[in-house]
Image (tube, rainbow, N blue to C red):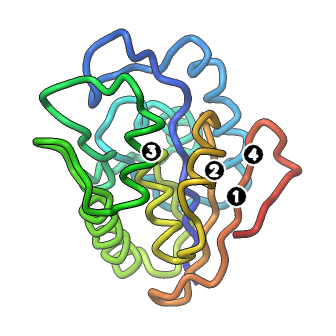
Amino acid sequence: MTTIYFIRHATPDRTVGEDATFPLSEKGLTDVPLVTAYLQDKAIDIVLSSPFKRSYDTVADFAETAGLTIEVIDDFRERAISHERWIDDFATFSKEQWADFSYKLPDGECLADVQARNIAVLKDVLVRYKGKNIAVGTHGTALSLIIHYYSPAYGFKDFKAMASLMPWAVKMTFDENACTAIEKIDLFAQNEVNHV
């Protein structure tokens, strides 16, 4: 069995930098210890992260505490929305993408592409780190699409429900490449576990 604890990043400060370099906000920095506390008794062997600063920084405190090095994996990055414009109505854009996995803006990614990229790298991780306990710093859309791949009933309504949960954890258990369990964990009320 391989267990992966996906950790959606804490709240970013979107006023500084661009998507890949958004730092954590003051609230995000305050919430990072929730991640460290959650992971500390999980016997984590490996810490992986998206290259985006907010995801890396969300798992960095745990990695340092546990004496582990973070391996950055580019394909765990969040979707590219568009290089040409900012999305003012993100909820409508997301709903359109979830309704049509091929929908995208110029220079952006559709959900089908983001899902394929994340699942391909996840399958590689499952081979390379078979039998390990792994923490992965990730993003809301990327994580939701991984869940959707293994549990197709997970859709826009679920994505919308977790949109404000930062940080957020999802524990997935694998037997070879087969996902045998998915548990959503509210880090602000860690006694609550919802099975997908």
Task: Indicate the amino acid at tag 1.
Answer: Lys
What's the residue at 70%, 34% (across, down)?
34
| Residue visible at 29% across and 28% down in the picture | 19
Mark-to-mark CA distance, 4 and 1: 7 Å
The quadrant in which the C terminus is found is bottom right
**Left or right: where 109 falls relative to 97:** left
Residue located 65% across and 39% down the image: 36
Q: Do residues under tags 1 and 2 come within 8 Å of each other at their CB atoms?
A: yes
In this rendering, the count of numbered labels is 4
According to the picture, the residue beneath numbered tag 4 turns out to be: 186
Q: Earlier in the sequence, mark 1 or mark 2?
A: 2
Residue topped by disc 1 = 184
Mark 3, other Cα within 10 Å: few <14 / some 14–19 / many ≥20: many
C-alpha separation, residue under disc 1 versus residue under disc 3: 14 Å
- Please report contact status of discs 4 and 1: CB closer than 8 Å, yes or no: yes
Secondary structure type for disc 1: strand
Labelled disc at residue 139: 3
Q: Quadrant of residue 112?
A: bottom left
Whether pointer 2 and pointer 3 mark residues with C-beta atoms closer than 8 Å, the reply is no
| Residue at the disc numbered 2 | 169
Question: Between 195 and 73, which is closer to the camera in this rendering?
Answer: 195
> What residue type is disc 4 on?
Asp
Along the line of sight, the residue nearer the viewer: 18 or 39: 18
Question: In the rendering, at what x and y percent does residue 69 appear?
Answer: 40, 46
